[in-house]
Amino acid sequence: MTSTIDDLLADAAIPTSSPSPSVFDVGAALRRLAADAAQAAPQPDMVRAAQAGQRLAVVSRWILNGPGAATHVDRLAEGPTATPVEEEQLDVDGALVFACLLYLTGHPESAQFWWQLAAGAGHRAAAYCLHLHHLALGESREARHWRHEVTHSVLDADAPDEAFLACLEAVARYVRHNGSPSASAPTGGLEMEVDRLAEHGANSCIIVRRPDRRLADRLADFTRR
């Protein structure tokens, strides 16, 4: 049957009344909001990892700017650069400073290697850096191991030393929140010297080799500024 124009217009007419509104479920809406908030909030492990990374950066800058940092790296640089570093010849503080410099200039794997050399020689600050490093990577088992090394494996003490760890963490928190004129980040010149060392040994090893005198001189300029 052919529809008339009046029938078509009637079908196309926009209704002037709307259906009765449904009752708003306040409880369901609140539950949806709570679920959305829970999904948006960072997980505790992610927060802990981020805080560890921030603290490690603070501690590394603090060590890099410390008294005698350049002198220790200069001692580490003495001798032929191709010669492997023997533990009895290692300037432990120099290895710690160099590791912190490597970390701050974007070479975390090499930093881990040099921190491990220093920590293996009994340097508790290096073990603390490794604790934070692994915590930032979400590697809880390794982080616990190095925390244990900080508090228990002390060569010159019989008892566990939680006070040393508490002191390091208190300093890191203070510097992070308040800043420090003696905790500057590496300059572009220092970063270029580290990259030069990294590129020089890239064909044979992914670990940045021991510092040379040129880098030690640049670090001395940095600490004298």
Image (cartoon, rainbow, N blue to C red):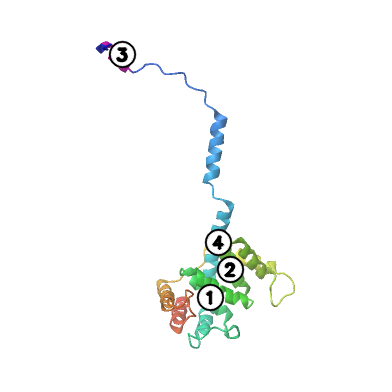
Instruction: Identify the element where label 2 is drawn.
Output: helix
Measure how far apart labels 1 and 4 are at the Cα level.
20 Å
**Relative to 145, residue 2 above or below:** above
Mark 1 or mark 4, whichever is nearer to me: 4
User: In x, y percent, where is residue 114?
Assistant: 54, 75
Measure how far apart labels 2 and 4 are at the Cα level.
10 Å
Does label 2 or label 4 sit earlier along the sequence? 2
Residue for point 45% across, 78% down? 204
Instruction: Identify the element where label 1 is drawn.
Output: helix
Instruction: Identify the element where label 4 is drawn.
Output: helix
Would you say the residues marked 1 and 4 are in contact, meaning their CB atoms lie under 8 Å apart?
no
Mark 1 or mark 2, whichever is nearer to me: 2
Residue underneath mark 2? 130
Residue for point 55% across, 29% down? 26
Q: Amino acid at mark 1?
A: Val
Mark 3 or mark 1, whichever is nearer to me: 3
Q: How many neighbours does mark 4 have within 10 angstroms: few (below 14), some (14-19), or many (20 or more)? A: many
Does label 1 or label 2 sit earlier along the sequence? 1
Mark 3 or mark 4, whichever is nearer to me: 3
Q: In the image, which disc is placed on residue 97?
A: 1
Q: Is residue 95 visible?
A: yes
Q: In the image, which disc is placed on residue 10?
A: 3
**Relative to 173, residue 206 above or below:** below
Measure how far apart labels 1 and 2 are at the Cα level.
13 Å
Quadrant into which the C terminus falls: bottom left
Along the line of sight, the residue nearer the viewer: 134 or 74? 134
Residue underneath mark 4? 136
- Is residue 14 a member of the stretch shown in magenta? no
Residue for point 52% across, 45% down? 40
Quadrant into which the N terminus falls: top left
